[in-house]
Amino acid sequence: MAINNQYLQSVYNGLAARNAHEPEFLQAVYEVFESLVPVVEKRPEIEKNGVMERIVEPERIVNFRVSWVDDAGKVQVNRGWRIQFNSAIGPYKGGLRLHPSVNQSIIKFLGFEQIFKNSLTGLPMGGGKGGSDFDPKGKSDNEIMRFCQSFMTELYRHIGPDTDVPAGDIGTGAREIGYMFGQYKRLRNEFTGVLTGKSLVSGGSLARTEATGYGVCYFMDEMLKAAGKSFEGKAVVISGSGNVAIYANQKATQLGAKVVAMSDSNGFIYDPAGIDFKVIKEIKEVKRARIKTYLDYVPTASYTEDKDGSKGIWGVKCDIALPCATQNELDGASAQKLVDNGVIAVAEGANMPSTPEAVETFHKNGVLFGPAKAANAGGVATSGLEMSQNSARLSWSFDQVDETLHGIMKNIYANAAAAAKEYGMEGNLVAGANIAGFTKVCDAMLWQGVAY
């Protein structure tokens, strides 16, 4: 792969040689570097001060063992990570992912993306990420509690409200955050805003649960408005059925659209009348069941088993697609199916769910495309608002948080669109988001000098 700038190509080549076993991380870096060619050429101080060499290396990687005892009395061992990537504009901020696919490459890619996503929010947050290859699926509450307590027994040494503030992610919801917060409080003997995504009774924020799903729809709404379009009357397909997908369904419906398909790792449901948000919420948040359970509530819907990671959902005809499941779920062939079926806009609710081939297909065919670091920044933005409330010992109303979130997502779109236009790539929000996010961090790094 060639980057049209000697300096950026050299930095990337060195990184690839040292991290050849980390494909997700290298994919994320390459995509950002491609966008930054005009910025690096316009600003020679970036190369002179080694900004790119520094920004791709985490400030700190903590890798640790997590030992816990299952309900049968057997000792289990998992791996844990916290990668503190960049603190130029604030304390490290990013979620904790609990999933068997977790490895260092995935945590590094997520942490690297988080640098720019957090920068785009306009809030003072650096980039970090963490997690474990632990799988909460099928575990009892007591097993999850014991794992979370063991995980935090190591992690607590490395985090703090002014140092590093983790949050939830795939596999880490309010239950897991609660167990971790309780253990942190016990170990440190202090009640601080060290984690976000907390329950309301422990300093959590209203609208945090809804924030990422709402945010991706607010961003999509701005994209559509700029093109003279709207959600009204549009058919929407949403991959996934977790937190982001559920509340993207709710907000898209409120904005006048009809969500016709949603999925999980086993398959997808199709409901031409519009998937009922309340039913999906009941299935996933109360019953914790598979998505095919939807047919028990709405027998007129259909379910399709899909052994290929639920890629079949991209064959459903729609106007708007919101990939909200996991990384690289939407490949070039899937993107072409969407284009052939008339899709007009795509916004990423998950982290890097579209492969480079998919993004190229959307751009080539004039599809409006909102990249993850911009479109799904609503979650971390509201985590930042939770941090603000914790620091002030205040609790804002749902409407106040939601209104602030809406304003942040509008600004993210405006800043990404303006940056793309400034550097001769009007309409390319991938480049615009990368440039707008990078510029703020770069300026902070230059201002602070080189940390030896």
Image: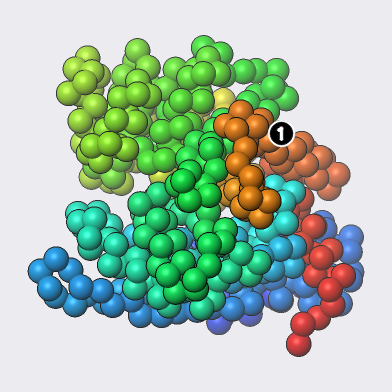
Residue 99 x/y as whole percent: 34, 60
390 left or right of 50 in image: left
Quarter of the image where the C terminus is located = bottom right
Query: What is the x, y in percent for residue 174?
Result: 40, 49
Residue ID at (82%, 65%): 444
Q: How many marks?
A: 1
Asked whether 252 or 187 is in front, the reply is: 187
State the residue at coordinates (10%, 69%). 72
Along the viewing direction, whichever of 347 and 244 lies nearer the viewer = 244
Residue 275 on image: x %, y % = 35, 21
Residue at horizontal 78%, vertical 41%?
415
Label 1 neighbourhood size at 10 Å, few (<14), some (14-19), many (20+)?
some
Is 257 situated above or below 308? above
SS for dot 1: helix
Q: Where is residue 168 in the image (x, y as percent from the top left)?
A: 46, 54
Q: The N terminus lies in which quarter of the figure?
A: bottom right
Q: Which of 68/255 is in front?
A: 68
Q: In this view, does 412 lie above or below 85?
A: above
Residue 337 seen by the camera: no
Q: Is residue 367 above or below residue 173?
A: above
Q: Is residue 421 visible?
A: yes
Q: In this view, does 390 lie above or below 104?
A: above
Q: Three-letter amino acid code at disc 1?
A: Gly
List the residue tagged with mark 1: 407
Residue depicted at x 53% and y 67%: 190
- Residue that lies at the very extreme toward the bottom in this rendered image: 452
Q: In the rendered view, does 387 fall on the left or right side of 289?
A: right
What is the quadrant of residue 205 in the picture?
top right
